[in-house]
Amino acid sequence: MKYTILVRFVNVIFLAMAALYPASFAHGQFPDTSGTFTLHGTFEGTRSIDSISIVVLQDISNPDAQHTYKVPVTNNEFRLTTTLNQPARFWIRDFMRFDYFVEPNDDLSVVIKGRNDSCIFSGRGASKLIMLQGMQHEFKNKPKPSAATSSNYLDYYLKLSGWTDTAVGVMNDYLSRFKTTVSPTALEISRIMVKFHLEEARFQTMQMLVVKAPSLSMSTNDLIRIFDTTININEIFQLPVTDYMASMGLLSHARQIIELSSWRSIDFAKQSSMFPEIQYKLAKSKYSGLARDIVTAKLIKVLLRHDGTSESVMYCVNDFLNNASNAYLKETVKKDLGQARRIAIGQSAPSFKLYDARNRLITDKDFKNKVIVMDFWFTGCIPCSRLVPVIREIEHRFKNDTGVVFINVSVDTDKKKWLNSLKEGRFTTGSGISLNATGEHASDIVKDYSVQGFPKLVLIDKKGRILSSMPPDEKPRAGEIDDISGVISNALYD
């Protein structure tokens, strides 16, 4: 989530620089070069800052190439010097909304005017960062279509699809201005990455259109026709993907593309128990090398969250552990599997002890012989806001049933923000029992319940056993309310 369509354009700059070495880059490797990266910084105005945290990420598949430096600030100035073995992503926590890309031997100066990425760059290596900032200005007068101003979701999707095609043209025009300062190869790689990230938004919107199709009286043939005439899936998969792109975490779009492409491959039929395996096999067939390991490891993490340790998911896990090459990613998948098993259906729900909105200490022992519906959320979580109507309707269905308890658990660290969100009812219903998972007496509830993304909905039966711990769809699907209500009803009368 910190990414947006515009934010993701930052990745373009990094790829453009990699393209300056096409011979090596074509094989997925950056030239064997290393050097220092120096960042000199100045905070504009009077500030009382003792230190800042600077994150430098070179390789997501290697924990030794991921660092967070605590850098002292003296008289509003700071300096970081570190060694890079390849280009890296970096950002300053709390002061940069997104990350930038640097190379070995870059010597940057930055003036920070405030939070939310108000930065002025100069020095060796600054040109690519300035180019990035210029990209954002290109879209100020070309806003993305809004669902709120569209007649229905199909209209919104078609508008967004047209905007996506136009946006690619706008970016091509912008990049053409740098013909004299950036190599043709670098410009072409930049265009490829812009295409990737713009397509990700189109894919996400198409997924929601599939969910909404019944309410729009759209048939499967309608969906297939719209997909095939607005998305060129072959063109997307034919775009070059290297190990180097993958190691830098530049394949955030891959999971959505794999999921929707798999769905299209079965003509948008209802997802069967074999759907995890279908996605996994498609990912394996479309990527190779380290890129395959990274994409499939990320996919398995999501599958374990959504489908648990089903037979189809375990096929994916076992195949990955037997065939993947990256040892770190294998350990990551083993860890994800362990977390999924800890809160598997039938397991005893972990205990907890948290304060509620009235500052009362609440524990799991307060709900003996009750069916518990537990919703994990935080202020600003857009997927959480999409779940609110679902939870609100379920609460309404069971409002007169004392055997059901609704608990919402927030990870907000700002108590005032948390309480305001409860009143607003945007990111949670604010009904039932409201708990906060931070502060004094906060348990390890987030870890114990394997909350790796938000929202997450956990159902617990009257004997304290897990009924369901899968996160709901990020965009509520048709029938979800009935499915969840059915599980609760069965637990009440079991």
Image (tube, helix red, strand yellow):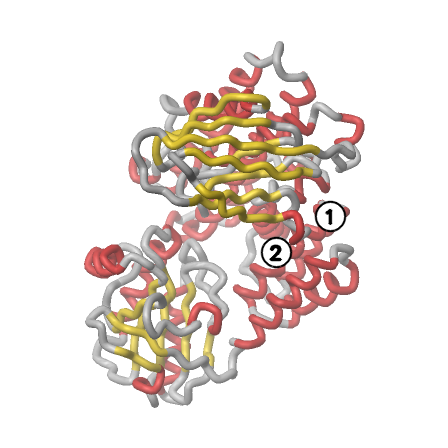
Q: Is residue 141 visible?
A: yes
Dividing the image into 4 quarters, which one contains the C terminus? Answer: bottom left
* CA gap, disc 2 and disc 1: 14 Å
For residue 347, above or below residue 321: below
Which residue occupies 41% across, 53% down? Answer: 214
Residue 458 is situated, as x and y percent measured from the top left of the image, at: 42, 72
Q: Which residue is mark 2?
A: 299
Quarter of the image holding residue 358? bottom left
Q: Which residue is mark 1?
A: 290
Which residue occupies 65% across, 56% down? Answer: 297
**Front-most of 237 and 332?**
332
**Front-most of 445 and 294?**
445
**Front-most of 208 and 179?**
179
Q: Residue furthest top?
A: 180
Closest to the camera, between mark 2 and mark 1, is 1
Which residue occupies 58% across, 27% down? Answer: 107
